[in-house]
Structures are given as C-alpha cells and as structure tokens.
Image: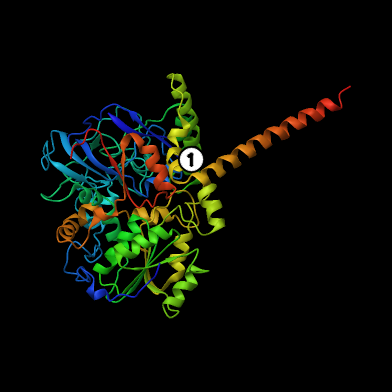
Amino acid sequence: MLAMDYRGPKRVRATQKPMPEIKHPQDAIVRVTRSCICGSDLHLYNGNVPDTRVGMTFGHEFCGIVEEVGSEVTKIKVGDHVLVPFNVACGECHFCKQGMFGNCHESNTQASAVGGIFGYSHTAGGYNGGQAEYARVPYANVGPTVIPEGMDPDDAVLLTDVVPTGYQAAEMAGIQKGDTVVVFGAGPVGIMAARCSWLFGAGRVIIIDKEDYRLEFARNYANCEAYNFEKDMDDPVVFIKKQTDFMGADCVIDAVGAEAAGNAMQTITGRKLLLQAGSATAMHWAINSVKKGGVVSVVGVYGPTDNLIPMGNVLNKGLTIRGNQASVKRLLPRLIEHVQNGVINPKALITHRIPLEEVAEGYRLFSAKLDNCIKPLLVFPSSNI
Amino acid sequence: MENTLRDPQKLPGWGIDANPENDPTYPMREPRMNVSQDPDSKHRPASLQPEDVEVLKSIERPNVSAVFGESSPPVGLSGMIRRFAFKYSESHYGHWLPLLLADRVNVVEGIIEDLGQGKVPNIFAEKGYAAEWKHNRTAFVAKMATIAAVTIGSILILTRDNDKKNKYQY
C-alpha cells in the first residue's frame, strides 16, 4: 500500500509499505478515504517531538471504510464508513471512564502523560497513522464512529480532530455569556476555537496571528475580530489590555504551541536548539494578557522536553490551567448535531486537495504557509468516495 | 482588512452550548472520581497485544499497555540511544535529550538504509521543494543562493588555509 513515510526533519515521501495487520482482537483495518495534514503534524515534520522515528507514517485525522475486524469487535462491521478520532482509547480504564479519552492508560506504553495518538511519534504510542491507504485502528469498539447518513465525508474527517479540539479549547476556557475571548493562532484549530467560542456565549472574540490571509479567513469564517501581531501592534499583551479597558481578556486560548513566532529568544532556545518544550511565546502572551482570575485554555501542542514548566504535560495530562488533548469521543454526539444543524461548517476550512503521492509538497505547502493554505486534505488513489 | 464589532446574538448558534445541562459539555461539572472511589481503577482489557517486536517502556508505568504501536522498532545506534533514554523517567533530561539525539542519528541511518537498498533518496522531492518553486519562487531562489554562497565561501576559506601552509614551505 502507498503511505506517507517520515525520513527526517522536513523530509517525507510517499512509499510502498506492508499492509497493516490485526494485532489485537479489538483491532480493525480501515481503508482510508480522507486524511488531513494537521498543524500538529508540523511539530513532528520539523523534528521537534522526541522519538519521532524514521519510517513512521503520520496522520491522526482520517476516516475510511472498515475492511477487516478482530474477533472482539462488535460496534462496527466490514463496509462501514467510519470517522476515526485521533485518540487511541480503550474506553475502560480509570481515565476513559471519566471521559478523558485523550489520556487513556492502555494505549501508550512509552509515555505516561499522553495517551495513544495515531501517527504521532513513539512518545504518543508509536502507531502508524492514516496518511496511508490502509490503517490499523486499535480499540475499534470505542473510537471509530459510523459517519451519519447524509454527512459529507469532508465534514466527517474534520470531526476527528480540528472541530473537537477547537470546540474543547472554547469549552475549557470556561466562557461565560458576554466574555471577551482572545485566541492566539489562526490556524485551523484557532479558527475553529474562535467559531466555537460564540456557541458558549462569548460577547467578543479576537484572534491574533501573523499571516494576513489566515486572519482574513478567520474574520470571515469565525465572525471575529482579527489582528496581525507584527503589523497592528507593538506588543500583543499591551494591545489586549488596551482593548479590554486595561483589565485583560476574560479567557485566552493558546492554539499555537511549540512553533510560535514573535520572540527571538524563544525561537532560538525553543524551536532551533530544542532546549525547552518549543517556543512558549503564545503561552507567555496568554498568561500575561488574561485578566486576573481569568482562564487560559491550552490546545497548542508543546514538546515534552525539560522546561521551566513541563507545559507539554499540562496539555497532555489535562491539568488545571486547563489544557488537554481533545477527548473526541466525548464530544462527537454534540458536534455531529451541530454539523447536521448547520451551526458548524467544518469542510469550509479545507483549502487544498493533494494526492498522497505528492505528500511532500503538501507538507511544504502547509508548513511554509504557501498559496494561502489553511487546511490540506490528502486524497487517495484507492478511494472512490 | 477591516475589523467591525458584531452583535454576537445575531450569529448562528450563539450561546447554544452555554447551558450546563447540555451534556457532554462542562467535563469538570461532575465531581472528579478519586482512584480510591473507582472500584476497578486498575482495570485492564482482557486481551493483550502480543509483544512480537521490541517495545520500549516508560519506567513510570508497571506494564506494557494492552495495545501499542509498532511502526518503527528501535534499530542500530539510534536504537541503542533510545534504550539508554528509557532508563530515565519522563521528568528527566536524560530521557528526552538522548531521544532527540537518537532521532537525528536515525535520519543518517535512514539514508544509509536507502543507499543499502540501492535507492538514492531524492532530497529535493522529499523536502517538497516543488511547492516552494511553484508558490514562493523568488524567496526560494534567494534562500538557495544564500546556502550556495555560504557553502562556496566555506570551501574557499578552507582552501585558503591550505594555500598559506604551502606558501611558507621551502
């Protein structure tokens, strides 16, 4: 089968690889019909996540047709078209029982903070991902969800990560009606977080980024105010204070994570030398621009390397500042309802369709923010849906 | 681009999830379950994935998780470094820095593996430079020219040192 193949920082290709196999009675094999490149994949692509091994296949946003199921799989059957949440979760452990599917204790042997994630380094379990024609999906009774009849697969694939992560970012921000919400980062997740902030009753939503095309997209898609931190302000923290009568925002969402631009020292120590868990610029801005007693919600991915604060673990363990990997399974029923009712229109985020054979160009396009790329979708030679 | 303040109440879906009765929102609404309150907190799935490849295990957990990925088992020098890293906990530099080093070593191993299989990696294609060429040509050419100039400059400096040595040899 054809699959994306990681060869080192900023080097990927499409390669023929062996077909995945059932390894556990609750496994399923899925023929992928849609797969996205996620902003978080870029942390791997840039070589910032430890234990990202050469030969790995990325991809944690995908949906596909069930081709084969293990002996204990009862909830889905061969032929079902399913969307696959990015979390690998058993559904039975202490954490899954509390709805913390992003923190499953039976899906990742190699780290204790984060649960298993498809195609997201060995730090997240070492699973091959869905940027391939076929993928092994463990715990097939828990995560995979049959795509509701009539739902566009382009909408469905975005329900595997972007929509739930953006939604949970807004949810974790504890928004009260009328609150001013600031979102750092106008990538797909930041845009979705801004859009979902309204659903919780925000009174004002501001998004901040450095790419004009993304800000324009956010302004239109999320109906929010959008500002360029390189052009519209000297200091984002002071700017937000001025915008909020010098009180600070009620809630701030960090939808950037380790790759943040905007501070030379953070860029050198965090992004280039990898001496801390990525560049914490957005995190600093968030903490400093929220009002006293406000809430900072973190969905930007930080690396797990040493830092003054192990921010990656704050995210991955779901600690209170309130950060976490989205627990997709918990949110899916509500979000499917929102998509079906037209409250959220996920597929509008997709700007590029790239054949799997050209995956290297897709990564470059997305990473370098070329051609006004917001969200690239990989299309598959074997998929006719 | 222009920002205009909007009346949020006119936006589709405004406030639709503000009601705490709307499950599954507000995940912290229920009292947090204590491990001691969970009668089966150490529950494990009945079936465990057989360990037919080498799986490195965090020392912060007693066992191998019931399922695991096996995309790229540890190999070669990078594998040795990874095994060393897994002697330390996740709160230790000794864990993460060797893993980053192993990742870089693994890149070289990947190239050697390709060459061993008679395949010369197409670095230009793997880096997706075709997209840069198509959408960002001027900056891309400038970047490549800079890299070429630095490379040639370095070679010239090294060559000049050799000339000096020869100059004073009689």
Q: How many marks?
A: 1
- Quarter of the image for residue A336 reads bottom left
Q: Residue at x 22, y 55 (%)?
A: A99
User: Is residue A295 shown above or below A323?
Assistant: below
Location of residue A312 in the rendering, given as x and y in whole percent from the top left corner: 41, 53
**Residue B106 can be seen, yes or no:** no
Location of residue B70 in the rendering, given as x and y in whole percent from the top left corner: 32, 33
**Extreme-right residue of the structure:** B170
Relative to the observer, which residue lies in front, B29 or B15? B15
Mark 1 residue type = Leu
Location of residue A130 in the rendering, given as x and y in whole percent from the top left corner: 28, 39
- On screen, residue A365 versus residue A178, left or right, reads right
- Quarter of the image for residue A365 reads top left
User: Is residue B15 shown above or below A320?
Assistant: below
For disc 1, the marked residue is B100
- Quarter of the image for residue A221 reads bottom left
The subunit carrying tag 1 is B
**Extreme-bottom residue of the structure:** A245
- On screen, residue A123 versus residue A171, left or right, reads right
- On screen, residue A237 versus residue A313, left or right, reads right
- On screen, residue A102 versus residue A82, left or right, reads right
Q: Residue at x 33, y 45 (%)?
A: A37
User: Is residue A145 shown above or below A254?
Assistant: above
Which element is circle 1 on?
helix
* Crowd around label 1: few <14 · some 14–19 · many ≥20 (10 Å): many
Location of residue A345 in the rendering, given as x and y in whole percent from the top left corner: 22, 58
